[in-house]
Image (cartoon, rainbow, N blue to C red):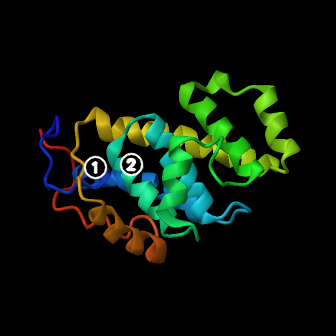
Amino acid sequence: MPHIALPTDDPGIRGLFRFRPETAAPLNGLAEILLRGDSTLSRGERELIAAYVSSLNRCRFCHSSHAAFAAAQLPEGMELVRRTCEDPATAPVSPKLRALLDIAAAVQRGGKEVSAEHVAAARAEGASDLEIHDTVLIAAAFCMFNRYVDGLGTHAPDDPEAYAAVAEQIVTHGYGSTTPAAEHSGPRP
């Protein structure tokens, strides 16, 4: 049961977006740029970073959502997502992505946990400054999204198919495409 009265029973962040639609637009815009905008990292790789950080934060809704979104965009599908979230050191990802996942994990622990060694290791594997920047921002943004979703006690479906159904919509149309127009324009008193 959510900690506040929401105008819908939509799970996770979708219910929160209907509660406060004026915050939904910029948050969806940030997700759109970070996860679907122009980048030398694939959309699937960026979703994998989001799913990994969400798994570290134990945010079931965000982890399940972004795992489904990553799986839909990676040739290796959910098996790669599962293996990466369980143990990125042994997952079959590129050395560059592994180094970026190390940076993401450091951000999840705290911004000052990212060291010059993390950055040097990523650069040694071919990561650009833009890829390092975006990895840090994806990880930081997902720490915020995870805390938003869990901090207000939203619910997360148990059925993986619920997330897979939304994945097709996100992959095809982007963030914001699944957030229906709000029935109410602001917080309830």
Among all residues in the image, which is located at the extreme bottom?
A: 172
Instruction: Please tell me how crowded label 2 is: few (under 14), some (14-19), or many (20+) other residues with Cα within 10 Å.
Output: many
Query: In the rendered image, which quarter is residue 189 located in?
Result: top left
User: Looking at the rendering, which quadrant does residue 159 occupy?
Assistant: bottom left
Task: Using the rendered view, name the quadrant where residue 114 is placed.
Answer: top right
In this view, which residue lies farthest toward the top? Answer: 112
Residue 46, above or below 54: below
Residue 161 position, x and y percent, is 29, 66
In the depicted structure, whether residue 119 falls above or below residue 60: above
Q: Amino acid at mark 2?
A: Cys
Q: Which secondary structure, mark 1?
A: helix
Q: Is 30 left, or right, of 184 in this rendering?
A: right
- Amino acid at dot 1: Gly
Name the mark on residue 12.
Answer: 1
Along the viewing direction, whichever of 90 and 20 lies nearer the viewer = 90
Residue lying farthest to the front in this orientation: 90
